[in-house]
């Protein structure tokens, strides 16, 4: 029994994950090699390290799951678990980045490249989380609306009988 087969086409979310990872991994890699020695009164280097090494692991995961399609439900469940773990990791990075950004610091002057990366990372991921939050609220409202319609139809049938 063959557990792996080639995908017919990629989903839009897979392409978005790939380009997101590629862009931020490239940017953090350039910063790691050329600008990581910039210092300010916050530990922005730790933030860059966390982004860089986290995205190396995530990029490996994307390469493993991009081309093949797995039929085994246990493997698919494990990959869904890894998706959730990465979302939690990015959420904690966003919280840590916000803490660094909102504190009193001189990083905009002393470490401008690291600070710009922090700002861009927070802006992009903040927008993504807002969109995901709105999608989740829309999904809940849609489910609630369908539930109300089903309830109203059942009540009408009950009254007609």
Image (spheres, rainbow, N blue to C red):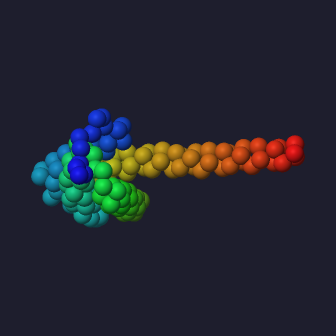
Compared to residue 107, the image places residue 26 above or below, namely above
Count of numbered labels shown in the rendering: 0
Is residue 34 at least partly visible in the picture? yes
Q: Which residue occupies 44% across, 45% down? A: 127
In the image, 69 versus 28, the foreground residue is 69
Percent across and percent down for residue 52 are: 22, 55
Residue placed furthest toward the left: 33
Q: Nearer the viewer, residue 74 or 108?
A: 74
Q: Residue at x 52, y 45 (%)?
A: 135
* x and y percentages locating residue 101 in the rendered image: 37, 57
- Is 150 displayed left or right of 155 in the figure? left
Tell me what residue is drawn at x 30 percent, y 50 percent: 71
The quadrant in which residue 100 appears is bottom left
**Left of 113 or right of it: where is 101?**
right
Where in the figure is residue 102, as x and y percent of width and height? 41, 59
Residue positioned 32% across, 42% down in the render: 14
Left or right of residue 161, residue 146 in this image: left
Task: Identify the image quadrant of residue 68.
Answer: top left
């Amino acid at each position: 029994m063959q557990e792996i087969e080639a995908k017919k086409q990629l989903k839009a979310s897979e392409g978005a994950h790939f380009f997101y990872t590629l862009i931020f991994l490239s940017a953090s890699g350039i910063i790691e090699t050329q600008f990581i020695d910039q210092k300010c009164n916050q530990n922005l280097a730790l933030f860059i390290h966390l982004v860089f090494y986290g995205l190396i692991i995530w990029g490996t995961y994307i390469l493993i799951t991009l081309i093949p399609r797995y039929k085994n439900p246990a493997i698919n469940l494990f990959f869904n678990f890894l998706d959730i773990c990465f979302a939690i990791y990015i959420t904690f990075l966003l919280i840590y980045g916000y803490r660094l950004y909102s504190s009193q610091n001189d990083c905009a002057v002393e470490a401008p490249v690291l600070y710009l990366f922090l700002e861009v990372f927070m802006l992009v991921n903040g927008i993504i989380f807002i969109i995901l939050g709105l999608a989740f609220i829309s999904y809940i409202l849609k489910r609630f609306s369908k539930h109300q319609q089903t309830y109203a139809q059942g009540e009408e049938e009950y009254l007609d009988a």
